[in-house]
Amino acid sequence: MLRVKDFDLEPGETYPTTAKHGAGRVLKLKKATLAMLKQYITDNNLTPTDTLWKSKRVMQNWGRLKVSIAKKLRISFK
């Protein structure tokens, strides 16, 4: 999960941690993405140690999407 401190907001770079703590890498952000990220951080008063999203919320969204698609395709998960 990315934290606010994983982003360098001046040059627009992010430093993600790999799943198994492998070699570090630098990813560039587009100017529009960087502007949205800065706005999100400001609007939500995030500190450097805050995460940008919670895994529980991602799970909930995935569950809702799965159910929605299943209804459209008339599939049952039972």
Image (cartoon, grey):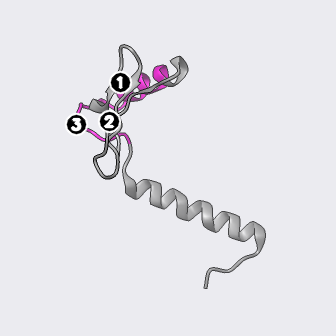
Q: What amino acid is labelled 2 in the image? A: Gly
Does residue 67 appear to the left or right of 17 in the view shown?
Answer: right
Residue 76 vs residue 56: left or right? right
Q: Position of residue 43 (x, y in %)?
A: 38, 27
Q: Which residue is mark 3?
A: 49
Residue 21 vs residue 58, the one in the foreground: 21
How many numbered circles are shown? 3
Q: Residues within 10 Å of mark 3 (few under 14, many from 20)?
A: few
35 in magenta: yes
Mark 1: few, some, or many residues within 10 Å (few <14, many ≥20)? Answer: few
Q: In this picture, is 75 found above or below 17? A: below
Kindly indicate the quadrant of the structure image that contains residue 48. Answer: top left
Farthest residue toward the front? 23
Callout 3 secondary element: loop
In the rendered structure, which segment of residues is drawn in magenta? 34-52
Question: What residue is rendered at 30% in x and 29% in y?
Answer: 45
Which residue is tagged 2? Answer: 24
Distance from the alpha carbon under mark 2 to that under mark 3: 19 Å
Disc nearest the viewer among 1 and 2? 2
The nearer-to-camera label among 2 and 3 is 2
Residue underneath mark 1: 42
Q: Position of residue 15 (x, y in %)?
A: 34, 32
Question: Which of the 4 quarters of the picture holds residue 9?
Answer: top left
Label 1, label 3: how far apart the Cα atoms are: 14 Å
Query: Does dot 1 land on a helix, a strand or a loop?
Result: helix
